[in-house]
Image (spheres, helix red, strand yellow):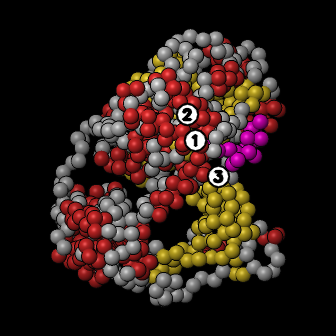
Amino acid sequence: MNRKEYEALVETVRQHDVAYYVDAAPTLSDREYDTLYRQLVEFEEAHPDWVLADSPTCKVGGQALSHFEQVQHVVPMLSLDNTYSRNELRAFVERVVKGLGGQRPVFTVDPKVDGVAVSIRYEEGKLVHGVTRGDGSTGDNITENLRTLKQLPTVLKGAPAVLEVRGEVFMSHAGFQQMNRQREARGESLFANARNATAGTLKLLDSRQVAKRPLSIVLYGTGEVSAGQIESQTALRECFQSLQLPVSDWFREVNNENDLDEAISELDRLRQTLPYPTDGAVIKVNEFALREGLGFTSKAPRWAIAYKFEAEQVETRLKEVTLQVGRTGIVTPVAELEPVQVSGTTVSRATLHNFKEIARKDIREGDWVVIEKAGEIIPAVISVRTDSRTGKEKKILAPIQCPACEAKLVQENVFLRCLDPACSEQVRRALQHFAHRGAMDIDGLGQAMVDQLVDHDLVRRVDDLYELEVSAVQSLERMGEKSARNLINGIEVSKTRPLWKLIFGLGIPHVGSGLARQLEQSFPSLDGLAAASVEELEAIDDVGGIVATSIHDFFNANKHQELIEALRGHGLNFKSETFGKEEVPATGVITGKKFVITGTLSESRDVFKEKILQLGGKVSGSISKQTDYLLAGESAGSKLDKAEKLGVKILTEAEFEKLAQYER
């Protein structure tokens, strides 16, 4: 093969990538494509000096980055105003018409893809860099991660000298589910939703790991463009298609409000059939010249709005109720459902909360029930279709014995609790909590490993972890000597964790990671905390009577005293490193401020909670007059409404990051 034939092969493979990943219309079988691709790889290995920078084989970088550089957006990346109300949508249309002096424009409607916004810059047709939205002015340079996306060309033919394209990186429903199944098989924690998984993936510093995740992208806008006569959103979409840039499958132009309503309703009906997660519709003025006349507010364009859909509700049959035992012994009823698609995922289980809730809603086995994903994450049974009953439905009775160990259950408020500390399910949950990254952070001790340790009777209490030997672990399924040694080493390293991680890992009721930090600052050692009176505990900020009593009772229970002595014997760290110390300067703008976090953010709430705590702030679960800031993501709900009524300062994620950057 000569140089010309090699370049032709590169172009052939690239076009097949476009056909498969962009057009969703492959022209070759997988086997035929793989043969072409292997041929390309083999030739490039034989002639490394001929390899083109934009070859399909060069999608993945080599060495991992140590950090992301910051890149300033030439054209700011603004957010969109949003609404759940058709009346507010009509008011938006009237504002646009008024702003245009009475002219009624053509609008476009396309899906609001629930992913992560990015801006990608091409110069002379070559991909130069890709950047996250960040705070709208500056974002992270994630170029190498974006290069791994099969749909995204690294070279454009016929593009302007400078072309910044903007869009959304996402995970398809099928790709997200498959990735979670693979993580579950490896004993790794599951991602809560596709958006968080996408955001976390784009923050990885090793593009080789990013390439293993099922990321995709759609494009819908531009930043800086050097030249061109594109005059509308419709023309921009056609331009992207001609450049083989990926766009959404669904798009509508509408000429009046009736057509706008019909388009939104059509998208709402079809959204689960689309390959990407979508939680609404984006409505824009089509003509760019009219947009210029309407302008922007400080945060959003006046010519666009996002209409958010209500959480999807579906009906399915409740086959039976199973029981789940938590780490504190609380027994929770779980609805086992006939599998049904909700918000892009297959749901077969939903929480029923407690047996008093079951009685209040009169839920029975065999009922047709209405379920939804609260915040599009947690499935819950909303109501019962009593009009569909046949008479064969069975009432659900509260159990008398623990389903795991058969110990007698006791009623505590609305909950049933198993008090047997040797209960196998409680041991599993306690181990998972103890080993969690936010607690003792034991590498390799995921759910699958915990199950094996408990099932083989190797661990009956968390202190048993520190007596494990390589030979015993090595005998377990899918464990070789190297994996066993890595686990034992991870357990050994956990002995050096800060005291607050141990306090949190012990699983004291009502004590989260934030309060655990405060307790370490307030007592010189675990022994000092264990000896504290209820009155001494109540003197700590944010510790009320119920929490103080819970901590005091925990340390005065014989079973917990035995556990603590066993952990002491294994050499765990019982001394505080922060007793009497301020973690951050007292002059910081976040220090001492009370935050509440709500809505969907780019990462899990635990990540933002950790940032706030590290900067000296406090995190609460409920809004009050004492709350200083509400950090509000998308779908913020009732907490946002309450914050507005109380006059609490509301921060977007970008505003919070600015505040945190200032603090540092």
- Classify residue 158 as left or right of residue 382: left
* Left or right: 168 in relation to 550: right
> Local crowd at mark 1 within 10 Å, few (<14), some, or many (≥20)?
some
Q: Which secondary structure class fits the magenta region best?
A: helix
What is the x, y in percent for residue 260? 77, 32
Q: Nearer the viewer, residue 217 or 496?
A: 217
Q: Which mark is residue 13?
A: 2
Q: Position of residue 488 (x, y in %)?
A: 25, 68
Question: Residue at (36%, 82%) from the top-left corner?
Answer: 457
State the quadrant of the C terminus.
Answer: top left
- Residue under pointer 1: 33
Q: Nearer the viewer, residue 638 or 461?
A: 461
Residue 312: within the magenta?
no
**x then y, percent, for residue 551:** 32, 70
* Element marked by disc 3: loop
The span shown in magenta is: 263-276
Residue 491 locus on image (x, y percent):
26, 66
Residue in the image at 31% along x and 65% along y:
483
3D distance between C-alphas at marks 1 and 2: 8 Å
Q: Residue at x 40, y 26 (%)?
A: 50
Question: Mark 2: few, some, or many residues within 10 Å (few <14, many ≥20)?
Answer: some
Give the SS element for disc 1: helix
Residue at x 72% of width, y 32% of height: 251
Q: Nearer the viewer, mark 3 or mark 2?
A: 2
Pointer 3 with pointer 2, Cβ within 8 A: no
Give the mark nearest the N terminus, 3 or 2: 2
Mark 3 Cα-neighbour bin, 10 Å: few <14, some 14–19, many ≥20? many
Residue beneath disc 3:
343
Is residue 641 among what the camera can see?
A: no
Q: Label 1 is placed on what type of residue?
A: Tyr
Earlier along the polypeptide chain: callout 1 or callout 3?
1
